[in-house]
Amino acid sequence: MKQKQQTSIDGQEDVNRMAENSFEPNGLRRSREDEHESRSGSDNMDGGSGDEHDAADNPPRKKRYHRHTPQQIQELEALFKECPHPDEKQRLELSRRLCLETRQVKFWFQNRRTQMKTQLERHENTLLRQENDKLRAENMSIRDAMRNPMCSNCGGLAIIGEISLEEQHLRIENARLKDELDRVCALAGKFLGRPVSSLPSLELGMGGNGFAGMPAATLPLAQDFAMGMSVSMNNNALAMVSPPTSTRPAAAGFDRSVERSMFLELALAAMDELVKMAQTGEPLWMRNVEGGREILNHEEYVRNFTPSIGLRPNGFVSEASRENGMVIINSLALVETLMDSNRWAEMFPCIIARTSTTEVISSGINGTRNGALQLMHAELQVLSPLVPVREVNFLRFCKQHAEGLWAVVDVSIDSIRESSGAPTFVNGRRLPSGCVVQDMPNGYSKVTWVEHAEYEESQVHQLYRPLLSSGMGFGAQRWVATLQRQCECLAILMSSAAPSRDHSAGGRRSMVKLAQRMTNNFCAGVCASTVHKWNKLNAAANVDEDVRVMTRKSVDDPGEPPGIVLSAATSVWLPVSPHRLFDFLRDERLRSEWDILSNGGPMQEMAHIAKGQDHGNAVSLLRASAINSNQSSMLILQETCIDAAGSLVVYAPVDIPAMHVVMNGGDSAYVALLPSGFAIVPDGPGSRGPHQNGPTSSTTTTTNGGDNGVTRVSGSLLTVAFQILVNSLPTAKLTVESVETVNNLISCTVQKIKAALHCES
């Protein structure tokens, strides 16, 4: 009898456990076998396949579990930080590497996400409970003060008639604040996609808590605004029965809540505009005859949308573009990347010079990114010294519109900050821009990207104005192309099928990480962003007009040699297609035609790491020929990137012993290098390139009508940049000879490239 009762208890425990974990996020019921294997975040059944036939044949026995090893947990945690929702391919790869079953990996991630969600909800509940207690205490004190009014003359209880006027004022103030709270609740309801009716009506003196009936961790952003309003209401009510000195904090709190309310209204309007612009076709978007890109019909835009950030400033021009593409990343992973400033910059290293999150207004609803709203600052760049860095202060708002359908929108806050008297920046504004992401089969996502901005055109060099006005400089095509290339690179590097004949997996990762740092430093030197403290040399002697020369001190940076670093960069137009120019510059066999580091001969590729299906996306290690037998050969680390928006060739000489450490999987942070290289983009439609008479060719396009066979030569915009250590002492003074040497080097390199491609002008 006892044995039978014990069996019943064990069975009831199994039923309880199945009731707790019987549904996955997509609503599918787990089997009994799956429930046992997912019982713990790090536990797993030992032995037994879980086959129902075996379970029927064998007598019931106590299930035995074993924990994952620390190494397995470490690997699982590392991937969880990068991608909380791995696809089937990633789980299969992880199960092979860790000697686990695919179901074990799947259940570990499910339980880990559940654990994370529980921790976030518990933390939010604690914060809400503390705030509720504080509000309840304040409201009780106000209620007591209103129930027992004291006469200021005799110190006794006041007669009702003596406070009728004060009570009337309080009622008027209470009605005004109630209307304000109703407006905030309606706004929060629109933000959440459902009505907010859990806030009770206010009574005289704010006697109710106002949040006692609200479920915990349900309305992060809404409760943020509502609590801000409630605090200001409490302070205003206190001001009616307290000395006037208490009104100043109330005013400050009210101003802050009003600003947040304005941020929310702006974010909601921007989200509506982004979704409409992403879904609407003609006549809002028209196909450009030259290039076939979508361009915005500004007249149609003005008829359909109200300016969300005010009218365009004088001297500003607009650029707008839209692009669609398939990307090897799921919607949740992409949304997490966009909402994290560090990961966002890593995904778009050539576009984003620097970025930071100024303030997190809302982290999202129930531990997700749905409803996340934050203030951000970014420096956006085109890789040329002739295009100024575009600084933007903006709101980033994320919203889930359906299962597997997300949208992330950016919009500048200049209009709000100008109205509050805060200083703003003036060289560009970001109108509602962003992307709509929809999950597709096999871990892909369909991305629709919209870019819309206004900027001061007079600050841009004439050579680059056609590129920017067409939306190819900061436009949607560049964002989508970069996203596709980066996601493809990540997929290849994580794949076990990646070639490893030259080096180990650890060596491959270290080498790619070193190349990434090299490319980031190259971009920072070209555009003079605030990543480094560059000092621009104005009117330097014997320096060409379009060459920008800057200098900085390198001190206590293990990734750079110490001393005075000189950077020189220029951009030129060449009558050569971007693809041909890229193939010429990346070919190690032709390097002697322009690179003085080649010692006059071809270079040999010692290692090659593919970063995409296109052979031009790679990291390679080159060796220059030695001039004589006594000289050791030089190693050059090179990264090449190409996509639909442009291409990049970046290289730097590296120390041979240090590279041996990197190739063996060592830390690449201590490898000192200074990068140089090239950035290539198309010259843009309507470019002012030279014209020629004669029939059209592969590098020419006929002008309007094609009269008299006049054609415009299509070409490339080439940026050449060098960073050189001119003195190993950081305290040394920069000499004129050093500046002239770098200027001569950059001019000589451009001339050699023109001569090799037979395009001397």
Image: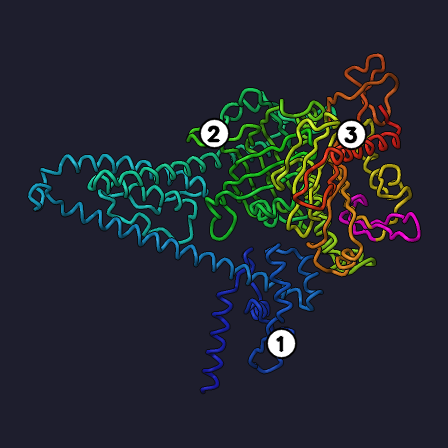
Structural distance between the alpha carbons of marks 3 and 2: 37 Å
SS class, disc 2: helix
Of 170 and 578, which appears nearest the observer? 578
Rendering quarter of residue 553: top right
Structural distance between the alpha carbons of marks 3 and 1: 63 Å
**Mark 3 or 1, closer to the camera:** 3
Tag 2: Cα neighbours inside 10 Å, few (<14), some, or many (≥20)? some
The three-letter code of the residue at mark 2 reads Ser
The three-letter code of the residue at mark 1 reads Asp
SS class, disc 3: strand
Spot the residue most to the top.
Answer: 708
Q: List the residue tagged with mark 3.
A: 716
Give whichever of discs 3 and 1 has the lower sequence position: 1
The three-letter code of the residue at mark 3 reads Ser
Rendering quarter of residue 646: top right
* Percent position of residue 712, x then y: 80, 20
Q: Which residues are magenta?
A: 607-634
